Each structure stands twice: as structure tokens, then as C-alpha cells.
Amino acid sequence: MEIKAALSLKVIMFMLFSLLYCGTATAASMPDLFIYDEQQHETNLLQVGSVLQSNHSGFARTSDELETWILNKKPQNRTTYFGGSYWLVLPLENQTKLTELVLYPYNTLVSRVETRIYDLDTPSAPVARYITGGLEKNEFAFQYGNKITLIPGKRYVLVTKFESDYFYTPPKLVLKPYDDFFPQITLQNMIMLLCFGVGIALGLYNLLIYFGARDVTHLYYAMFTACWVFAWSQFFHIPDQIFGYYNAHLHWLGFTLIPLTNILFYNSLLKLKETSPRLSIASLLLGAVATLGVPFAILWPGFGFIWATFVTGATLCLGMFIGVRSWMSGFKPARYFVMAYLAMAIPNMVGNLTNLGLIPPIAIDLYLLGLIGTSLDAMLLAFAVANKFSLLHDDNVELTKNLEQKVQLRTQELEQLAEELRDASEAKSRFLANMSHEIRTPMTSIIGYADGIILGDIKPHERNHGIRVILQNSRHVLGLINDILDMSKIEANRLEISLVETDLFSTIAHIESILGKQIRDKGLKFNVNYEFPLPDWIISDPTRLRQILLNLAANAIKFTTVGNIELSVSCEKDQLWIKVKDTGIGMTLAEQQELFTPFYQADATNTRKYGGTGLGLNISKSLAQKLDGDISVHSEVGSGSEFSLALALQITEKTRWVNSFEDISIEQPKDLVSSQCQRNLVGEVLVAEDHPENRQLIERILQRMGLTVTAVENGQDAVQATLDNQFDLILLDIQMPVMDGEQAIHMMQATGLTTPIVALTANTMKNEIDRYLKQGFVDHIAKPIDRSQFSHKIASYLDIEMHEEVKLPDHEFDALKKTYIEGLKNQRDTIAAQFGSGDIDGLAKSIHMIKGTAGMFDCDALYQQAVCLDKSLKADSITLDSRLVNGLLAKMDSIISPVKQ
């Protein structure tokens, strides 16, 4: 009875003290009794108990001291991010049938959690004491918590003190049945170890791949994996429970390094620098800013929590945007990247918002969900890397297959060419034997008659006949020599055509005057048939036109013994037709198909009987094609042949259409004075230059020279172009993205390419030029380009002489220069950013580009400044001369400003 009376008195006193202190803001009171039953296993005790400020006092020694001890404490509204301690006080009664429970603090990292349980029903009972935390040896592997005993039906007061270097997240404290808790944490530990195992295995695997393949994508992946494994190991008590080492200052080190390693990884994976340079720069800046917080996160872990929360959140948002953008642009590996970011972002962003108090606490272990999400992220990123390299492998297989097909095709072409060369060699052998006969026969007459005249063997009245024989045979030999020279020019692609105003009727009359007598002397009839209306003046090369018609007529005279030869002139559908028809021996269909082949003659019998070199018709066809026309033949054996010359009809301003022969003017044609025009080159040139304005300027200069130009922006496209087409000359810039000039020439040489390759470079030092020449370049062209030297050097490799400098029209050059200056603004911003961030390698590349372009657009002051800065960077690649950089930026501003105005 006395004990009950004492207890009743204590309760009354406690209630009085509670009422007294409830009315003040400076005193705490005992919270309501918490009834623990089967529905309260997930209840956070911190939400139902009283959280009190810590005043560095110890625990109450007995149940009797609790009332006074509580009244000396003040309520604490919330925890702080920057460390400290506080108390939790909670009266409770166990109304379950369970005796063994687990007091389980989770979702937090604390240095020490000490709990004491006071028995209210038996005040004399000893106070139960339990300790857990980062600095203590814990009962459960990788988990905080203590196994406690609460007898059902008895009332207790639970007092817990939380101590930590920082409180960056609201802790959760629950009571769980021991029989349920142990399987739960066992499963959690298995999941946790599995996640860490996946991360470590994937990281080591990609690190090994990097050592073999030297692809930085794998290195960045391994670095990213190492950072998140280290970061999450702090939250799952790996260092303190395995290695016995607990240091709160390392908790946020891994998370502050994750943004940089992750950004480096997806920059390489998604080829962000090539596809979106601005996003690449923005992401790298974010990674650099995140890394700047590392020392502060180590010194002040509370700051580290806030910093890591914001930078990882920003990295997740930017990475998600970039991933979706890459996916939408058609880059297939980006789909795994997006799914990986979703797996990591959802639990971690929810955890961040919960930690910051922006959303209510959730009764689940967010750390475990965050670890699972990050592990899924690592696995899906591994799929993205594998998918990327699968695509690269497929591309390489396709390229190899393409190369094999090209090599096979080239082999077939070479075999065919070898066969053609054998045939050509045989034909040339026959040609030389025939040529020997053709030259020796007239030379015998020339020498014989000349010796006879000199020695006096020929009588004076016979000398005129001898001189005529010498003259006739000399002209024959001269014709042979001219044919050989023309054929050589055709083979060298140097046969020249000069298009001028040509009197059509005068040209035909000249042919008639030369051949008419020869034809009639052979006993043949000859007539010229004009099919009116015809133009009197056309645009053509009169010398080459006469050469074609003389060859066709001479061929008709050679193979015609009886009958007639007719030359007809007509116009039809914007074409001029000149036909030479004879009644000679004719030809078979097979002979007609080979007729225009060099050195070809119908058969040896005809050669011996009629003579000739077999060059005339081939030369005539080549000349006709140069004049934008062609020659065709129709023939039947024994019925003669008809050669038809078709030319594109081009008339002049003074052209008159003549309807009858009487309308033809009998006046002698006036001398035509035509200006000496720049001769066009002939050939196809491949230009590889990454700077768009440079590329367009070089392309226009080459086109003005009459060349066919294919322009590409990097070495890889240049290699592909050489596989698809054949070129007479290749100009390769040395510094290009994707594949530079040195890599490209190695690829071209591997395919058996023999086309001359000239290096375009702003590097003009002798050792660099020697290195280019050793790699296979036949020459170099320095940038900025000197147009006179450029045109003469191009002409030398195409084997044509140039007499004048190639100039662009002023309006074309001004338009290109304006486009170049408009692009200087972005280049100026890039150089300023590189200088500000200390990116010396990037700055050196930018300066080199300015050096190679400014002089080409007459920006001489900017060019000279770039040359000085380029030399400075090459002399000292570690420090920067700020005066030179600022001088360059000032020069760029002076060029850009007038355009803005």
C-alpha cells in the first residue's frame, strides 16, 4: 500500500510539474504514453516522442530523477546540418506478446546513439543501457541497432541521445520484432553486397578494357563506378564495420566527385563535343564547379551534404536532357543512357528532396533504394557502352567489307588494265613497226633526191620534180610527227582547245582547196553539199576543226579507189553536222567498234596496202569531244563508209543564217582579235579542310581554275571519298576533327592509293614539313594561301603551265570574308573561355585555326598576332602570355565591331 501511495504521489507531482512547465517556452514536459502494438512496427519514434536540446548533461541515473531531468531540458524543433547532439524522450508500453525487440535507427549516419530504458513500474530495477553508431561496435552487420527486452504490459521511458559530427538527414528510429528484423536486414545486406559487387566488377572490367583498347570511355566509366562505390560505402557502414575506420569528413567526398566523372563519361559516350560543343562545354563547367566543392565538403560535412545535393541534382537534370536529345537525334546507345539516368534519378532525387525537407519523410530506407538505383544505372550504362562499341564494330565490319569490295574491284580493274596494257603494248609494237615503215619510205625519197641534187646526179631540168618530191614527202613526215605529238598531248590530257569566232564557209572552203585536187587527181569525184539554212559564223576552234575534217577526208581518200567522196554540211536541233561519205572498201561491225582505238588499223593487209599510223581517227574523235561533240561511223563492207561529225552549235552576235550559196559573203574574213584568256586546268581535286570558310574559299579558287572539286570537312570523309571516286590531286588539311590529315593519308595508303597528296598546314617549320613528307605527302601548301603560288603549284601537279594569277571576283571574296568575320564572334568567345579556364591545349588549337584562316581573308593584323601567340605557345606550353592573348582578342574585336555596326 505504501509503494502504491508513493507511486501515486510521484505521478501527481509529475503532472503538476508538467502543467507548470507546459505554460513556459523554456521547459520540456513528458510526452504522452506511446502504446506499442503490432501496427506500430514502422512508427518513427522521433515523431511521437519529445526531442530535447542537449546541454551536455548525462542521463538520469534512476527513474526517480526523470521528472527533474526532463524539466531541465528545452524542446528542440529540428536537427541541424552542421553537427551536435539531442535527446529523444518517449514513455511507452509494450502491448504485444513479444519480449525481444530491436531498437533500430536507420536512414542516417551518426557517430553515437546511446539509449537507456527506465522501468516505471519497477523503479528499483537497473537502467538498461544500449549503444550503437559509427564509432561503436555494432551488434548487426552493416546495420545500426540494439536488441532490447520490453516485458509486455509494463511501462517504460526510453531516453536516447543522438551524437554526430553533423545531422544532414532526419534520422528514423523504430521498434521492430527481432524475429522479423533479422531476415529483413539479412536480405538488405545481400542486396547491398550484390550492388557493390556489380559496381566493383563492372568498374574493374572496364578498367581492364581501357588498358587494352585505350578508349577513354571505359576509363571514365571505371572512375564513375569507383566514385559511387566509395560514396555509398560510407552510408552502409563499410569502412567502420569492415576496416574499423570511421571518418565523417569523407562521407561526401565520393558524391562531390560523381558529377565530374559522370560528365566526362557521357561526353565521351555520346560524342558530345562533336554533336553539341556548347552543351559539352556547359556540362564540363558544371563538373568543374562541382569538383571545386571537394575541399569544403571534407572540412565541413554539413556543407558537403548541401553541396552534393545541389550539384548531383543539377548533373542529373542536365544529363537527362542531353541523353534524351541524343536519343531523339538517332544515337541508339542513348536510350540505355536515358533509362540508366531514370533508374538513378528517381530514388536519389526523392532522397534529396526528403533530406532537404521539401517533401514529407517516407517510411522506407531511401539509402538502399538509392544504392539499388545507382547500381541499375551502372548496369544500364554498361549496356550503353556495349551498344556503342557494337555499333562501332558493325561500322568497322562494314568499312572492312567495303574496303574488301573496293580492293577486289581495284584488283579486277588492275587485271583488266594489265590486259589492256598488254594489248596496248602489242598495238604500240605494231605501231612502231608501221611507223618505221611510214617514216623510212618518205625519208628514203627525201634523202635520195637531196643527195642526187647535191651530187649532180639529177639533171637541171629534173630538179624541180625532185624538189616537189622532197616537199611532198617532207609534208607527209611532218603530218606523222604532228599526229604523234597530238596523241601524246591527248594521253597527257594537255591537248589545248581555243574557242573563237570561226567562219564556217571559209573553213570548209579551205578543206576543199587542200583535198579537192588530191581527190580528183586519184580519179574520184568530189563535191561539197550545203543543206541550208546554215550559220556563217560559229564558236569553235578553226584549226582543230580543219584537222578533224582533213583526217576524215584523208582516211576516205586512202580507202577509196573508185567512185566519189562527198562532204555535206547541215544543222539539226542545235547541232552542226558535217559528214564525209565515200564509196571505198567499207568495214565490218567489229572493225567499226575498234576503229577509234589508238594505234588500231583494220588488219595487217590494209596496213601494208594503204599505210598509215592508226592515230588519225583517234585524234579526231578526241578533238571532237573537246569541241563538245563526237564522231560516229556507219559502214558496210564493199559499200563504203560515212563518218559523221556532230558539234554543239554555238553562234555569235554577228551570225547570219544563210539560205543559199549566193548569200555567202565573198569578203575575206577580218582578223579576229580575242583576248588571251586564262587557260583552264583539267582534273578532279579532293579538298579536306575543317574550317567552312577556308574550305569554300579554296573550292572557289580551284573552280575558277576550271577544276572539278569535291570538298569534305574531315579526314574520315576524305578516305571514304577516295574509295568512292578517283581524283587527280588531293589536298589534306593536317589538323581536322574525327580524323586528322596524318591519319587519313595512312588509311589512303593502306588502300593502295597512288594519287599525289599535298598537305595544307599552318605549320611551316622545317622539321614539321619533313615529317609530313616522310609520311607520304608529296608537298605542302602553307596557310594562309598565296593564291599565285597556290595556282602554280596545283598546275604543276596537273602538268599544265599557268601564266596568270587566279583571282576571285570582288563580290564573291567580300561575301566569303563577311561570313568569316561573322564566325569570328564564336571563335572569340571560345578563346576567351579557354584562356579563362586555363585550357592551354584547346587554346593552342583555336590559335592555330585563326593562324590558318585570318591571312586568307586579308585580316593581316589578326594573322600576325596569331602567329606570335602560336610561337609563344609552342615555346612554352605551360604558361600563357596574357598580353599576347589580350592583344589577339582586341584584334578580333576590332574586326568584329564594324560588322556589328
Image (cartoon, grey):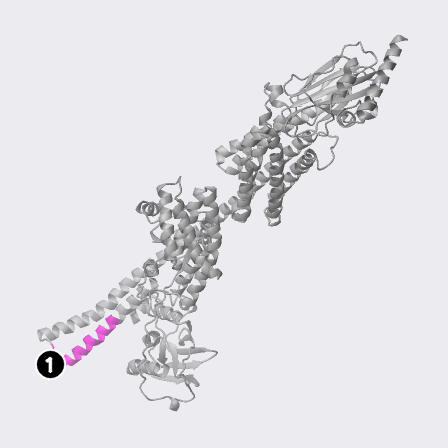
Which residue is denoted by mark 1 in the rendering? 460
Q: The magenta stretch spans which residues?
A: 458-478
Q: Is 463 situated above or below 61? A: below
Residue at the far right: name it.
Answer: 1
| Residue 317 visible within the image | yes
Quarter placement of the N terminus: top right
> Could you classify mark 1 by the number of other residues whose Cα lies within 10 Å: few (under 14), some (14-19), or many (20 or more)?
few
Q: Which x, y percent locates residue 278? A: 54, 48
Q: Which x, y percent locates residue 29? A: 79, 23
Is residue 463 highlighted in magenta? Answer: yes
Q: Which picture quadrant has residue 197? A: top right
Is 797 situated left or right of 91 in this image? left
> Which residue is more in the foreground, 759 or 419?
759
Q: Which x, y percent locates residue 315? A: 60, 40
> Which residue is more in the foreground, 1 or 342?
1
Label 1 secondary element: helix
Q: Give the amino acid type for the residue marked by disc 1 in the picture.
A: Pro
Residue at the far left: name it.
Answer: 456
Report the predominant secondary structure element of the magenta stretch.
helix
Q: Which picture quadrant has residue 307? A: top right
> Which residue is more in the foreground, 548 or 331?
331
Is 678 situated left or right of 830 in this image? left
Q: Is 154 situated above or below 203? A: above
| Residue 735 visible within the image | no
Residue ID at (46%, 58%):
897
